Image (cartoon, rainbow, N blue to C red):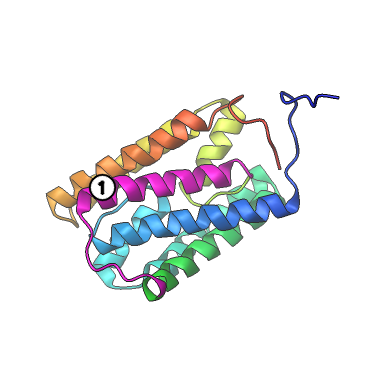
C-alpha cells in the first residue's frame, strides 16, 4: 500500500532532539562567524552581540539572560512543550558559542563571507527548530505566535524587528560592519520567509 505523503506525520522524540541539536549547532556557528568579524544580527542574539561588544560580557551569558522574560509568553501562548524545548535550545546555543572557539580555530574570515554564510547558517538552524516546534527564544517566540494565530509570516515580521535592532548597531559598530550585518539579516530572513509558511512542511511535533 502506497503511503499518503500529503498527510501530516508526527515527529518522534528522537527526531525532535536531533533537529534541536543540529539547529542550535548551526545557529551557534553562525554567531561565532559574526563575533569573529564584529557583526550583529537581529532578535535577542543581535542584542546580545551588541552588548558583548560594549561590555565585554560573554555572548552566551547575555543571550541566556535576555531570553528569560520571553519564556512567560512561550508558556502562556505556545504551551509547555514549546517552552521547554526553547529553553533547551537557548541553553545549547549559549553553551556552543562559548565552546566553539575552543573546538574551532578561525585564523581569518572575510566579513562578507561571514555575513552571508553566517546568516545562512542561522536561518537554516532556526528553520529546523521552527519545524520541530522550538526556537532560540526572544523575537522568534513572538514571531511564531503571530504566525500561528494571526497568519503573519514569521520571517517577514522578524525582518522588521531586526531592522530596528540594526539601526541601533550604527551607534556601536563601524558603518561597514552594519552594512554587512544587514546583508546577513536579509539572508537569514529570506530562508525563513520563503520556507516557513503554512502548507510548505506538513510534519508536526
- Relative vertical location of residue 129 with respect to residue 172 in this rendering, above or below: above
| Res. 157 in view | no
- Please say whether residue 179 is one of the residues in the magenta stretch: no
Q: Position of residue 77 (x, y in %)?
A: 64, 43
Q: Which residue is found at the position 67% from the left and 51% from the top?
A: 16
Q: Can you say which quadrant of the picture contains the N terminus?
A: top right
- Relative vertical location of residue 77 with respect to residue 169 in this rendering, above or below: above
* Tag 1 secondary structure: helix
Q: Which residue is found at the position 52% from the left and 42% from the top?
A: 127
| Res. 79 in view | yes
- Would you name the residue on which mark 1 appears? 181
Q: Which residue is found at the position 32% from the left and 58% from the top?
A: 33
Q: Which residues are magenta?
A: 103-132
Q: Nearer the viewer, residue 154 or 196?
A: 196
Q: Position of residue 136 (x, y in %)?
A: 51, 53
- Please say whether residue 115 is one of the residues in the magenta stretch: yes
Q: Can you say which quadrant of the picture contains the C terminus?
A: top right
Q: Which residue is found at the position 20% from the left and 55% from the top?
A: 110
Residue 155 picture quarter:
top left
Amino acid at each position: 500500500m502506497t503511503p499518503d505523503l500529503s498527510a501530516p506525520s508526527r515527529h518522534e522524540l528522537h527526531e525532535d532532539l536531533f533537529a534541536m541539536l543540529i539547529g542550535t549547532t548551526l545557529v551557534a556557528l553562525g554567531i561565532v562567524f559574526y563575533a569573529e568579524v564584529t557583526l550583529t544580527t537581529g532578535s535577542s542574539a543581535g542584542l546580545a552581540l551588541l552588548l558583548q561588544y560594549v561590555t565585554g560580557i560573554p555572548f552566551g551569558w547575555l543571550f541566556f539572560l535576555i531570553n528569560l522574560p520571553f519564556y512567560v509568553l512561550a508558556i502562556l501562548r505556545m504551551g509547555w512543550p514549546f517552552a521547554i524545548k526553547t529553553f533547551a535550545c537557548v541553553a545549547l546555543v549559549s553553551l556552543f558559542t562559548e565552546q566553539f572557539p575552543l573546538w574551532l580555530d578561525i585564523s581569518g574570515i572575510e566579513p562578507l563571507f561571514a555575513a552571508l554564510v553566517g546568516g545562512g547558517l542561522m536561518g537554516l538552524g532556526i528553520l529546523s527548530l521552527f519545524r520541530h516546534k522550538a526556537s532560540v527564544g526572544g523575537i522568534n517566540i513572538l514571531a511564531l505566535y503571530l504566525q500561528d494565530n494571526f497568519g503573519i509570516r514569521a520571517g517577514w515580521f522578524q525582518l522588521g524587528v531586526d531592522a530596528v535592532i540594526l539601526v541601533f548597531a550604527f551607534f556601536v559598530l563601524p558603518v561597514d560592519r552594519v552594512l554587512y550585518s544587514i546583508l546577513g539579516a536579509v539572508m537569514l530572513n529570506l530562508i525563513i520567509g520563503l520556507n516557513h509558511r503554512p502548507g510548505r512542511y506538513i510534519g508536526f511535533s
